[in-house]
Image (cartoon, rainbow, N blue to C red):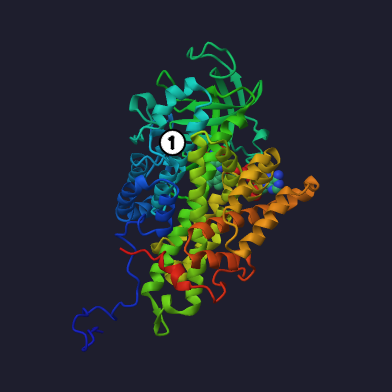
Amino acid sequence: MAVTSRPEDSSVASWQTHTVFNQTPPLEGVDLFSANLPLVEAMQREGAGWAMERAAALGTIVGSEPLRWGFEANENPPVLHTHDRYGNRIDEVEFHPSWHRLMALSIEHELHALPWRSREPAAHVARAAMYMTVMQAEAGFACPTTMTFAAVPALRSTPELAAEWEPLVTANTYEPALVAAGAKGSALAGMAMTEKQGGSDVRANTTVAEPRARFGCSAAQTGEGAEYQLTGHKWFCSAPMSDVFLVLAQAPEGLSCFLLPRILPDDSRNAFHIQRLKNKLGNRSNASSEIELRGAWARMLGEPGRGVATIIEMVAHTRLDCALGATAMMRLGVAQATHHAAHRSAFGALLADQPLMRNVLADLCVESDAATAVSMRLARAYDDAQAGDEDAEAFKRVATAVGKYWICKRAPNHAFESMECLGGNGYVEDSGMPRLYREAPLMSIWEGAGNVMALDVLRALARSPRARDVFLAELEEGCGSDPRLDAHVARVRAELTAETAQPTELAARARSVTERMALALAGSLLVRHAPEPVADAFCASRLGGEGGLEYGTLPTSCDFGAIIERHIPVA
Ligand SMILES: Cc1cc2nc3c(=O)[nH]c(=O)nc-3n(C[C@H](O)[C@H](O)[C@H](O)COP(=O)(O)OP(=O)(O)OC[C@H]3O[C@@H](n4cnc5c(N)ncnc54)[C@H](O)[C@@H]3O)c2cc1C
């Protein structure tokens, strides 16, 4: 039967049944940095105003082609090649070209190294803002970017190894070929701690390290800088195509940290074998593997028997990036949700004008505002600590654990609610929201899952009264203008300064304590720095008991419009 166009609309082609309308235009061609007002404000406030133009230029790039690269890199996940066509073991991972484009973007813009390369103030703050901007295009490639960034402080524990490797891991050129790092002039770094029998509990590692001189690298036969042979497995090892890994293994002196290159000093390949790639919920553009070390050559990094103390320097920086990553995901969620609601009508009115949707959007925006404020304050603590400020070092220690726990915990449900704002379109892959939803829980699981982080907060407080005091002092900075915050901070102060309870009882409420600390920190920052409607909504719903368990339950006295307005991305 012939299909004819409707007579009243001659522009409709003969094969069309209807006119497409009331669909939201794609969110493209936007400067993803400048459109993120809370981030722009925080970058200025925390001392990295000098990087504003640079971040905006990157934001413009990320809002265009890289959005497509993110889709392509996920739709064409990495493939492991254990052997070549002749049966030789090669252990190489093949990626889609869009993955390499994303990696090049990240490395060329120094997201892996800015604080180690730049002489500008607040370089951690600048990097954090740019990292959170790029992560809106795709999250998978942030993993190798982060590990390369985070390896530097741990590398510095052995100056001889740092002298060799720091220039390579901080180089701003991306060369994926598996050749000697020295020859290509750059390197990506990974980490291998987790084993089958224990990830959080790395002291249970069974990989063995035996002293064995092969290349005459160090005068010492054992200990820091000496050559070892590693035998064992690692159950999770992401970015296995990296050039160098920080690995924990049991040396005769106890659990120690080792620096293990893929390519040996004689240009042959190390005995680092990739068993298989993990079939993951999300994070599909990134390769995460299981590996075998069959007498792999490595050099001891840091002091013998102090492996955890050495690698914890790396872990602290990866935890910072988990908080930043979860914050970036919330930003992506509110950008998509507010954009959609501003273009989609139902029941005769724009979604953005409907009271209940305004409550949902405003609640999501408040969460994103809070996460941004905490993440950027945290980044400044890293700058201040790097400059030698001991109070900042103490604050950073406890606030990293608090921020990693809380922001990462909030991200998955935030992603779900943001997705729901797009209705059925949000559940379809083309929208990017399913990818966001799958990625979100990962920030909480890796680098210290929720319980481990909450217990880490207690550990940091118990070990350092100074950390507790500087954290409380930061909270007090916001007191005096909102009684709900004042009361909450008073409760946190009482809790943190009380005589400690039984260890078992204390551990059992570690999440509650950490949650209250996180809310106090976010509230203190928002009261000082955010527009009044944002701070008011946060204090009412998160501190004053006027909010519900789900998003969209702010008290109706809140100024929804003022809260949402600053989050709507404008092309
Ligand atoms: C995609 C992906 C990539 C990864 N990449 C890497 C990598 O590159 N390198 C690497 O080394 N690891 C990597 N990991 C491993 C990751 O860091 C671990 O999975 C994580 O640290 C948890 O360890 P686990 O899996 O052994 O769980 P477990 O340690 O067994 O923990 C299971 C649960 O028990 C809880 N728990 C643990 N101890 C306690 C306690 N004392 N009290 C109460 N609760 C507790 C944890 O919070 C968690 O919820 C990756 C993981 C994933 C999912």
Residue 369: tell me if it is visible.
yes
With 188 as the anchor, is 249 left or right in this view? right
Residue 142: x %, y % from top left:
44, 45
Q: Is mark 1 within 8 Å of ligand 1?
A: no
Q: Is residue 91 above or below residue 44?
A: above
In the rendered view of the protein, which quadrant contains the N terminus?
Answer: bottom left
Amino acid type indicated by mark 1: Met
Label 1, residues with CA under 10 Å away: few <14, some 14-19, many ≥20: many
In the rendered image, which quarter is residue 286 located in?
top left
Which quarter of the rendered image does ligand 1 occupy?
top right
**Secondary structure at numbered mark 1:** loop
State the residue at coordinates (47%, 14%).
215
Give the residue at x 50% y 39%: 384
Left or right position of 492 against 422: right
Question: Where is mark 1, residue-wise?
Answer: 241
Horizontal and vertical percent position of residue 456 = 65, 44
Q: Compared to 448, does 87 lie above or below? A: above
Question: Percent position (x, y) of residue 270?
Answer: 47, 25
Farthest left residue in view: 10
Would residue 236 be seen by someone viewing this image from the given angle? no
Q: Is residue 203 above or below residue 509?
A: above
Quadrant containing the C terminus in the rendered view: bottom left
x, y percentage for residue 271?
A: 50, 26
User: Most extreme residue toward the right, as rendered?
Assistant: 502
Number of disc labels: 1
Q: Nearer the viewer, residue 310 or 49?
A: 49
- For residue 79, above or below residue 154: below
Name the residue nearer the viewer: 554 or 383: 383
Residue found at the very far bottom of the displayed protein: 8
